[in-house]
Image: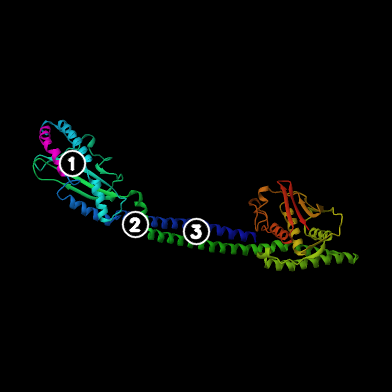
Amino acid sequence: MTSIRRIILVQHEHMNRKHIPISIISFAILFAVQYVLIYNTFVLRNNQYQVEERKILDSTYRNLMLNDKLFPGGQQLIDSIIQPYYPAFRQAQQQGSKEFDQVARKFCDTLFTSLQRSSNTDSLFRELIANAALDTTLQYALIITDFEITFDGRNYHKVLKGKWELNNSRPYIQIDGTLQAIDKQNQITGLTVSSPQDNSYKIAFELHADNPDSRFYRIIKQMAPTLILSFIAISLVIGIYYLTYRNWARQKKMTEMTSDFLNSITHEFHTPITTIIVANRSIENLESAVSSDKIQELTAIIARQSLRLQKLIKQALNITELNEYNLDKESFKLLPLLNESVSDYTLSVKHNVSLTFIDELQNPDTDIRLNKFLFTTAVYNIFDNAVKYNTSKIKTIKIRLFKKNEVIGIEISDNGIGMNEEQFQTIFQKFYRGKEYMNRPGLGLGLFYVKKVAEAHGWRLEISSARNVGTVFTIWVH
């Protein structure tokens, strides 16, 4: 039975190791697909953010800049500053790049300082927002991305030099506005204006508008249906995995319970069958001169153990409902009952097992209400553990009946291999067995029965143990 159970458990462990990685990989693939879909949706929403607002601002701004640059009056200001510089630029161009750069830096300082000081974009932008009933929290930025001059209307020369020179860290010059996060996503308008005339210039400028503090949340709000559907899809998959795993666990448990059921029959039937066999052989070997009292004693043992075997069959069929016993209690004298249990068990053990019974009760006729079958089963299971987990040459079991603080105690001690304190809370679990004991026969039902019987009677069970010293079980009955 034990080998069959091990084969079943090994098969289940193999299935478990095989299915868990597949489930994890499948979920990871699903999560990655959902992430890509959500990310692409976010990018799409981000690119389309405030499309209508941008169209309105773009159209209005372009109409204002048809005959102007940057802001109303910007072209007149630029022309008034650049016209006096053309002769200086031409002369510097002929002298060399160093001289040209010096004139360009001076020109840029004058031009951009004047533009920043004279810009009326703020009032213009607020007026546009109000007229179009747009979001009043929008921020803007008016920037220049290029400025070049030409002497012949064909060849242009960059004049953004010195601190005004553009680079990767600063690809624009901000003329007005408070918007800091300037990118392609919040660009409203981009214009490049030039003239194919001598002594003219080319300027590229852009208007950006955005509300960076709330853009992310607005996009998330727009994506709410997608996010909800993705969440539902992932939740459903997780739910399916959970149900599948739970059903698999139930099937695994049912298979284990089938094996446990067969093992429990062997475990529980061993004592009464052995006792009946020994008693029967004793009768067969008796001489005719032996008194009838001895024969009656042995037949009584056979009768008791046969009745016990009958009850064990009923118990085995209801093994999973052990904690639901409807106790049928009767009043028994505790001392004769324990003597009877010790006597019956002695017949079933080998010669190297010593059972000693010590009665310290002042009143040997003390009556206790209990279920005899469950009580003797619990006692036999403690005896079985004392023998099974014992490496001593002489396996000693001591049963002591005593009273403390008006409560009767049944103490069963042995000289077995003992346990650590960490095991005290787990040894009473159903089918629990320590890893170091897996090679020993049995299933781990013995102490489970003991605890359940004590709980069913309302008794208290105590345990103390030490490695290589032994174990002491004490049942406090009342």
Closer-to-camera residue (139/313) = 139
- Residue type at numbered disc 3: His
Principal SS element in the magenta part?
helix
- Residue type at numbered disc 2: Thr
Q: Which residues are magenta?
A: 75-92
Q: Residue at x 31, y 45 (%)?
A: 181
- Residue type at numbered disc 1: Phe
Q: Earlier in the sequence, mark 2 or mark 1?
A: 2
Whether residue 175 is in magenta: the answer is no
Label 2: which secondary element: helix
Q: Earlier in the sequence, mark 3 or mark 1?
A: 3
As drawn, the label of residue 19 is 3
Closer-to-camera residue (323/201) = 201
Between the residue at mark 2 and the residue at mark 1, the CA separation in whole angstroms equals: 37 Å
Label 1: which secondary element: strand
Q: Between label 3 and label 2, give the one nearer the viewer.
A: 2
Residue picked out by circle 2: 41
Residue picked out by circle 1: 147
Q: Residue at x 87, y 64 (%)?
A: 294
Between the residue at mark 3 and the residue at mark 2, the CA separation in whole angstroms equals: 33 Å
Residue 165, located in which quarter of the rendered image? top left
For the residues bearing labels 3 and 1, Cβ distance under 8 angstroms:
no
Badge 2: residue crowd in 10 Å (few <14, some 14–19, many ≥20): some
For the residues bearing labels 3 and 2, Cβ distance under 8 angstroms:
no
Above or below: residue 376 compared with residue 125: below
Q: In the figure, is residue 460 to the left or right of 18? A: right
